[in-house]
Image (cartoon, rainbow, N blue to C red):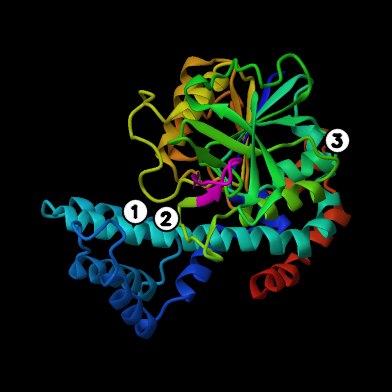
Amino acid sequence: MKKGLLLGAGFSYDLGMPLSCELTGVFLGIYNDTNVKRLAAAMSGQQPYGKDRPINKNAITNGWDLLLDYKKKNGTNYEIFLAGLQSLKGISSPTQSDRDSYNYLFVYFYDIIHHILCLYQEASYAIVYETNKQWFSKLENLLSDQETWIFSLNHDLYCEYLALDFNIPITYGDDETLTFPISNLNMSRRITFGCTQRAKMSVDGSGYFKNAKGINLVKVHGGISELEYRDNALLCNLTLDKRSSRELAVDFRLSNEMAYYRGGKKIPGGKDRTITNLAGELDIISQSMLTGGSKYSRTSKIKEGEEKLQIFDDALRRLDQLTIIGYGFGDDHINFRISNALLVNDNLTIVIVDPFCTETPDCIKQFDYDSRIRRAACGAAHWMDYCVGGKWNVEQMNALKENCKLRTEVRER
């Protein structure tokens, strides 16, 4: 049987990563009426796009008001707020100054959320992972005898960590490498990335496993460890030739230290990061994380920059079973592709694993016949044990109930 997995935030929940509502609470908790006024005033005086493209104070104020309004309404999904901010670009035919101002705000919030996720990744690994990884040891039960496609909507590294620690071959499909020094002040210490030319990405790419056991991992929405280089032509990921998750975690920390210094001071960056190339010169590399309301276009036609969606489409046509874990069906570009795949691939069945999933999502309800859609009201680790033997692991279930204390510790850190 050809199997694939689609992973949402629920997959990493028992390893310490936040659900959307928790991350939103941390993000919105940073801001209040007082510091928002100071931040708005400070941002209004900046010139991020040069003197000939001034920032619009009213637009900046509107953006911050949108955040405070969302917080007062007890908003629980930061992506809805970001989508609202992006939509302001289209109101009343804004000027270039308006567009620049809203984009400036979006990049600022993007950087904050990316930073929070990085902090969560490191804290959860230190506090939760070693305690709970044993309960994910049956990950192999979800995999095919040959290659398994895993499409992750998460930004974390836990699929990679588990594969390394349980000796499961895993690849991003990279077929090139690229090396950078940590900085121009530390040229001797270097970090190597695996790379893929975006234009050549394909389900049949030479870097993926074919007819051999292993995970072909595609981070559909990018990730905190995935970077874009040379005007997004190259996708760069940390190399996975590691003996354990601990080695990959060290590389992740190093990648976050990459920088360029001038006069002894680190040159700041946001989504576009300043780094050092092998010649000791300033270079630019970008975060790949997709968030907000414009991750991908709303049509089924694949456009430039949507190569991962093409791989998703093509893989779904070849699968017999797609197990969906911890995904709330909130992304239209994912939902209609699953629906299309069920239409064109008569062999495809769906297993939805989610403790909060009580009924079949509307986007695939028409295919809920002849056991094509199955549901399991449990977490990822529970299903790994149950799906083969048909028995729940009571020890595991009781141990994971203790996660509340660990998650509180992660959040406090």
Disc number lying in front (3 or 2):
3
Q: Would you say the residues marked 1 and 2 are in contact, meaning their CB atoms lie under 8 Å apart?
A: yes
Q: Quadrant of the N terminus?
A: top right
**Which residue, given by chain and number where applicable, does mark 1 sit on?**
83
Q: How far apart in space, not on screen, are marks 3 and 2 (Cα)?
A: 35 Å
Q: Residue furthest bottom?
A: 34
Which residue corresponds to the image point at 83% horizontal and 61% vertical from the top-left? Answer: 399
Residue 80 percent location from the top left of the image: 38, 56
Question: Which portion, as a residue range, is magenta?
Answer: 274-286
Image check: 291 left or right of 127? left
Image check: 253 left or right of 276? right
Q: Is residue 344 visible?
A: yes
Q: Nearer the viewer, residue 259 or 315?
A: 259
Which residue corresponds to the image point at 53% horizontal and 37% vertical from the top-left? Answer: 220
**Which residue, given by chain and number where applicable, does mark 3 sit on?**
167
Q: Would you say the residues marked 1 and 3 are in contact, meaning their CB atoms lie under 8 Å apart?
A: no
In reply to whether residue 279 is colored magenta, the answer given is yes
Residue 259 percent location from the top left of the image: 57, 55
Q: How far apart in space, not on screen, are marks 1 and 3 (Cα)?
A: 40 Å
Image check: 242 left or right of 368? right
Picture quadrant where residue 352 is located: top right
**Which residue, given by chain and number where applicable, does mark 2 sit on?**
79
For marks 3 and 2 on the same chain, the one whose residue lies earlier in the sequence: 2
